[in-house]
Image (cartoon, rainbow, N blue to C red):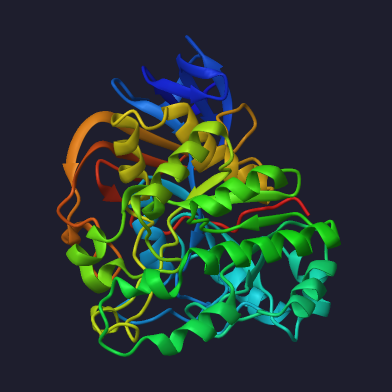
């Protein structure tokens, strides 16, 4: 048998450990793992490289509902090109777009739009509203849908389901896991009059305080237990939430964002100003310590970027009028590899959180592991490479990153999607090869 591609001399990051072995690919799938596997039409020498299962970013905002996105900020082409340059093979895109992904027609159109407009594979969230709760069981079964997304606290866009009765209706519709932005809207509204335009950017974390997040998460957990519906709490940002969720693991899974692992208040607001403003906000060092403890003891299931680009003009308005959200899909893996270099987690744990975890939580078929028969989605990394992250490297048209000027150790060298070379040595493919992801219903 002649394989399509043989990757030799690399170290495979497998579920059971790191193994020096070759990997063969045929028809877009992993065909074999071993030594002396046989001839191949093409051979890639991965000497000095580690081969990760394809990195999945389960939390991105590509700003594109299938009509071209936001000029000068982001669209599906530019956002997924950023993904492959950063070593990401799959992304799950949020529904707060134009048009919003909240009905069968908009989701079907966006699903069809992926082919030809995405450089990596894409899954779609269906957005919950107070009006579409009765349709959510049907929407979650549509092709390419990774989960239902509920904004229980307001963020960018106009999707909001804030009251317990409406959230309970959403939870009774369908049966797959629901992903929640769990800040408490009532506390946000009650506290907002305390602040005025032009207050310091650090007030973002004062307004959207610990109790705002903790109260939102407690409410969602209680409603999930009442409905016996699994829930995924997105961007958990506080020590209090992580401690509380320890006792709810049977039904509640946990996402942490990269930024809540590597940036802390108040220093980040002093240094970056509006480019530190995101929801939930960046918090004090004790919350970072709690997040790393949760990564270490298994309470965290997925790590995402919450890639949410905005124009510089929108970001640089006075607080609280400035846009909340940061770029991140392109810098997610380099920043996490740097945490491996700093011995904050192992490469195997990184693969669990950023490949196997998202595939397991969302039910992505044939994704997340280096395994015979799975899609040949692979991210090749050099753990010793040192690079400087710069705004000029960012593929998103907004052209900025909160990590500008930071030097990291560990870098993606190649991104392979279903056996096709999407990025190699910093050069992205010119033809979009992404497809909609298949999810278990």
Where residue 393 appears, as percent x and y from the top left, is 21, 57
Going by the picture, which residue comes out furthest to the front? Answer: 194
In this view, the residue in front, 311 or 169, is 169
Quarter occupied by the N terminus: top right
Apparent side of residue 50 relative to residue 184 in the rendered image (left or right):
left
Q: Please tell me which residue is depicted at 57% across the width and 19% down the height of the picture.
A: 16
Question: In this rendering, is residue 338 above or below 436?
Answer: above
Question: In this rendering, is residue 430 above or below 325?
Answer: above
Going by the picture, which residue comes out furthest to the top? Answer: 36
Apparent side of residue 272 relative to residue 170 in the rendered image (left or right):
left
Q: Please tell me which residue is depicted at 71% across the width and 59% down the height of the picture.
A: 221
Q: Please tell me which residue is depicted at 18% across the width and 41% down the height of the picture.
A: 387
Question: In this rendering, is residue 146 above or below 164?
Answer: above
Question: In this rendering, is residue 152 above or below 271?
Answer: below
Where residue 81 appears, as percent x and y from the top left, is 36, 59
Q: Quadrant of residue 104?
A: bottom right
In this view, the residue in front, 128 or 155, is 155
Quarter occupied by the C terminus: bottom right
Where residue 107 appears, as percent x and y from the top left, is 65, 74
Where residue 95 appears, as percent x and y from the top left, is 57, 73
Residue 80 shows in the view: yes
Residue 43 shows in the view: no
In this view, the residue in front, 28 or 139, is 139
Q: Please tell me which residue is depicted at 37% across the width and 33% down the height of the picture.
A: 380
Q: Quadrant of residue 192?
A: bottom left
Apparent side of residue 188 relative to residue 288 in the rendered image (left or right):
right
Question: Across the whole image, how many numbered discs are drawn on residues?
Answer: 0
């Amino acid at each position: 048998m002649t394989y399509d591609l043989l990757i030799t001399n690399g170290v495979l990051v497998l579920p059971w450990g790191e193994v020096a072995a070759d990997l063969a690919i045929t028809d877009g799938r992993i065909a074999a793992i071993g030594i002396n596997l046989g001839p191949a039409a093409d051979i890639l020498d991965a000497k000095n490289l580690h081969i990760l299962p394809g990195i999945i970013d389960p939390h991105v905002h590509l700003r594109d509902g299938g009509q071209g996105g936001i000029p000068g900020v982001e669209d599906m082409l530019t956002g997924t090109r950023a993904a492959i340059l950063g070593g990401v093979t799959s992304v799950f895109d949020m529904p707060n777009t134009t048009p919003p992904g909240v009905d069968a027609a908009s989701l079907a159109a966006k699903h069809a739009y992926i082919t030809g407009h995405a450089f990596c594979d894409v899954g779609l969230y269906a957005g919950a509203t107070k009006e579409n709760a009765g349709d959510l069981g049907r929407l979650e079964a549509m092709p390419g849908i990774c989960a239902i997304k509920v904004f229980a606290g307001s963020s960018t866009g106009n999707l909001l389901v804030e009251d317990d009765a409406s959230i309970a209706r959403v939870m009774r519709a369908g049966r797959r896991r629901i992903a929640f932005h769990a800040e408490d809207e009532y506390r946000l509204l009650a506290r907002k009059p305390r602040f005025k335009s032009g207050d310091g950017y650090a007030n973002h974390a004062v307004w959207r305080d610990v109790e705002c997040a903790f109260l939102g998460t407690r409410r969602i957990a209680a409603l999930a237990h009442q409905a016996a519906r699994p829930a995924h709490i997105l961007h958990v940002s506080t020590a209090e939430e992580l401690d509380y969720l320890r006792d709810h693991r049977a039904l509640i899974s946990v996402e942490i964002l990269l930024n809540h692992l590597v940036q802390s208040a108040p220093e980040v607001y002093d240094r970056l100003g509006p480019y530190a403003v995101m929801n939930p906000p960046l918090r004090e060092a004790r919350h970072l310590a709690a997040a790393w403890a949760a990564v270490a003891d298994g309470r965290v299931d997925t790590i995402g970027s919450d890639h949410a680009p905005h124009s510089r003009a929108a970001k640089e308005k006075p607080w609280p009028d400035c846009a909340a959200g940061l770029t991140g899909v392109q810098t997610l893996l380099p920043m996490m590899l740097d945490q491996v270099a700093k011995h904050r987690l192992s490469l195997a744990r990184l693969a669990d959180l950023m490949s196997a975890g998202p595939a397991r939580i969302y039910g992505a078929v044939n994704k997340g592991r280096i395994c015979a028969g799975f899609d040949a989605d692979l991210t090749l990394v050099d753990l010793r490479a040192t690079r400087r992250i710069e705004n000029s490297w960012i593929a998103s048209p907004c052209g900025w990153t909160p990590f500008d000027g930071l030097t990291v150790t560990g870098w993606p060298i190649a991104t392979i999607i279903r056996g096709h070379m999407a990025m190699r040595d910093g050069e992205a493919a010119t033809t979009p090869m992404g497809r909609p992801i298949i999810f278990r219903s």
